[in-house]
Image (cartoon, rainbow, N blue to C red):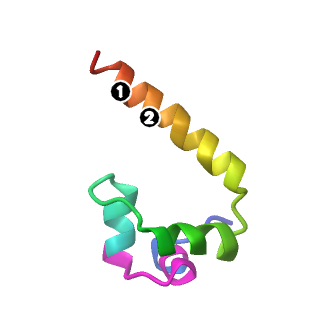
Amino acid sequence: MDATQDEFADKLEIHVNNYGNIERGLNCPGGETIIRLITNCRIDITELVLEVETQAKRIYSDKE
């Protein structure tokens, strides 16, 4: 079962509005939020970095 925004925001210890803004790409998560994402949500840091790298290449290759 997928987590709701409220449940995920609780795991990250942030307000649900802030989580929604991150999800929509309006805000970037801070360092503490990223650490909680890795620890509280059991996200593999290697997978996280690889996903960020993939997204960055897609975004910035469009601007060249």
Quarter of the picture containing the C terminus is top left
When the figure is inspected, residue 11 is found, relative to residue 2, above or below; the finding is: below
* Residue tagged 1: 60
Q: Is residue 33 left or right of residue 18?
A: right
User: Residue 32: x and y, percent?
Assistant: 49, 75
User: Residue 13: x and y, percent?
Assistant: 49, 84
When the figure is inspected, residue 9 is found, relative to residue 61, above or below; the finding is: below
Q: Residues within 10 Å of mark 1 (few under 14, many from 20)?
A: few
When the figure is inspected, residue 51 is found, relative to residue 12, above or below; the finding is: above
For the residue marked with disc 1, what is the amino acid? Answer: Tyr
Residue 55 magenta = no
Q: Residue at x 27, y 21 (%)?
A: 63
Outermost residue toward the top? 64
Between 26 and 45, the one lying in front of the other is 45
Structural distance between the alpha carbons of marks 2 and 1: 6 Å
* Mark 1: secondary structure: helix
User: Residue 60: x and y, percent?
Assistant: 35, 27
For the residue marked with disc 2, what is the amino acid? Answer: Ala
Magenta segment's dominant SS is helix
* Residue tagged 2: 56
Between 9 and 50, the one lying in front of the other is 50
Q: Which residues are magenta?
A: 8-17
Q: Residue at x 52, y 84 (%)?
A: 10
In contact (CB < 8 Å): disc 2 and disc 1: yes
